[in-house]
Amino acid sequence: MSSDACDKATELPCTIGFLERSEGRLVKARRMLEPPHDDMCVVYGPDDEDTTEIAASLARVRITLDDTHREAPET
């Protein structure tokens, strides 16, 4: 697999995912960021700078979503 192809295939979803997160659309952000993160872990490894940036963003999304669900009133 060419790294250029992988870069282009992950760049747009990551950009959209970061935008969704900044706009507070966390579920959409998670859906956009998880697939390229998984791909980048395989291609570049989990310690790659870009991979860790996506992982950090995903972690913030997941924490916020978990906190939101915990604070929601039970019905």
Image (cartoon, rainbow, N blue to C red):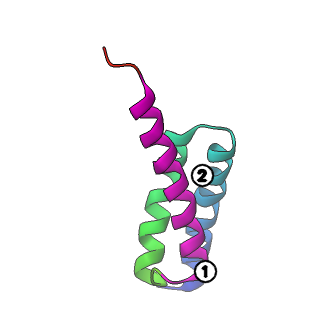
* CA neighbours of label 2 inside 10 A, class few (<14), some (14 to 19), many (20+): many
Earlier along the polypeptide chain: callout 1 or callout 2? 2
Which residue is pictured at 45% across the width and 80% down the height?
A: 46
The residue that appears at 64% across and 51% down in the rendered structure is 16
Q: Residue at x 69, y 45 (%)?
A: 22
Q: Is residue 43 positioned above or below 61 on the image?
A: below
| Residue farthest left in this picture | 75
Secondary structure beneath label 1? helix
Quarter of the rendering containing residue 15: bottom right
Q: Tell me, yes or no, whether the highlighted magenta stretch contains residue 69.
A: yes
Give the residue type at disc 2: Gly
Q: Disc 1 marks which amino acid? A: Glu
- Our reading of the magenta stretch's main secondary structure is helix
Residues rendered magenta in the picture: 47-72
Residue 37 image position (x, y, % from top left):
48, 67
Q: Which mark is residue 49?
A: 1
* Lateral position of residue 22 relative to residue 64, left or right: right
Q: Position of residue 72 (x, y in %)?
A: 42, 24
Give how far across and how far down residue 67 sits, in percent.
Answer: 46, 39
User: Quarter-wise, where is residue 49 in the image?
Assistant: bottom right
